[in-house]
Image (cartoon, helix red, strand yellow):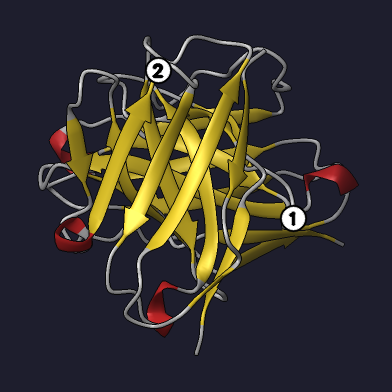
Amino acid sequence: QSVLTQPPSVSGAPGQRVSISCSGSYSNIGAGYDVHWYQHVPGTAPRLLIFGDNKRPSGVPDRFSGSKSGASASLAITGLQAEDEAVYYCQSYDSSLSKLFGTGTEVTVL
Amino acid sequence: QVQLQESGPGLEKPSETLSLTCTVSGGSITSYFWSWIRQVPGKGLEWIGYSYYTGTTNYNPSLKSRVTISVDTSKNQFSLKVNSVTAADTALYYCARDLPWAHYFDSWGQGTRVTVSS
């Protein structure tokens, strides 16, 4: 099955900017399907952060932004805060008619 | 604000059928797709499949032969059945609201843990 690949972890000091990559292939992100991002604090429900590559649902701070180029996408967090510590997942659709999640990236605030 | 709550047995024996229910409150169950997603311990998220109230379904090819998802509009609930479970089906199971044709999940339940063990 196709996989969306993310770095296992990223870290940054409070106030800094971090970026998380999401690498797909010609059958998913590269085919033009939208990329979406979720924030997951273990023990709680995952939260939609970004949909449609770069749109934020109501209530999501503008510190979170998404972008896409070719078969890859990125999530950027600016002004990093302690409350941003979580696991972040990208998600897209694949030509195999399946919805795919990324491998997940743990964000640590130093 | 829609809310989703999973329920079901936390323990299943190998080879039996896992059955979970998701109760939807604060919104109509007929306007969206409804998905199940799981997280195997130590792993990432895996989409299992979705159902629409009309009976339309779509399943992850890797699980398709063992999975059934259905919607009960009279109870505002949808359910998941996984046949012939093994230890590999031990996971945290989430239900989620799935935006039709937009392919993302805008509301999730808290998750329910299922262990497969004899």
Q: Position of residue B82 (x, y in %)?
A: 32, 60
Quarter location, residue B109: top right
Subunit of mark 1? Answer: A
Q: Position of residue B78 (x, y in %)?
A: 42, 33
Mark 2 crowdedness (10 Å alpha carbons): few <14, some 14-19, many ≥20:
some
- The residue furthest bottom is B118
According to the picture, the residue beneath numbered tag 2 turns out to be: B73
Foreground residue, A2 or B81? B81
Foreground residue, A72 or B109? B109
Looking at the rendered image, the disc whose residue lies closer to the viewer, 2 or 1, is 2
Q: Is residue B19 left or right of residue B6?
A: left
Subunit of mark 2? Answer: B
Residue in the image at 73% along x and 61% along y? A11
Helix, strand or loop under label 1 = loop
Same chain shared by disc 2 and disc 1: no
Quarter location, residue B86: bottom left
Q: Is residue A13 left or right of residue A1?
A: right
Per the rendering, the mark at residue B16 is none
Q: Is residue B39 left or right of residue B56?
A: right
Q: CA distance from mark 2 to mark 1?
A: 29 Å
Please tell me whether residue B3 is drawn above or below residue B47 in the rendered image.
Answer: above
Q: Position of residue B33 (x, y in %)?
A: 34, 24
Q: Is residue A93 left or right of residue B110?
A: left
Amino acid found under the numbered disc labelled 1: Gly
Q: Position of residue A49 (x, y in %)?
A: 59, 31
Marks 2/1 in contact by CB < 8 Å: the verdict is no
Please tell me whether residue A100 is drawn above or below residue B108 in the rendered image.
Answer: below
According to the picture, the residue beneath numbered tag 1 turns out to be: A43
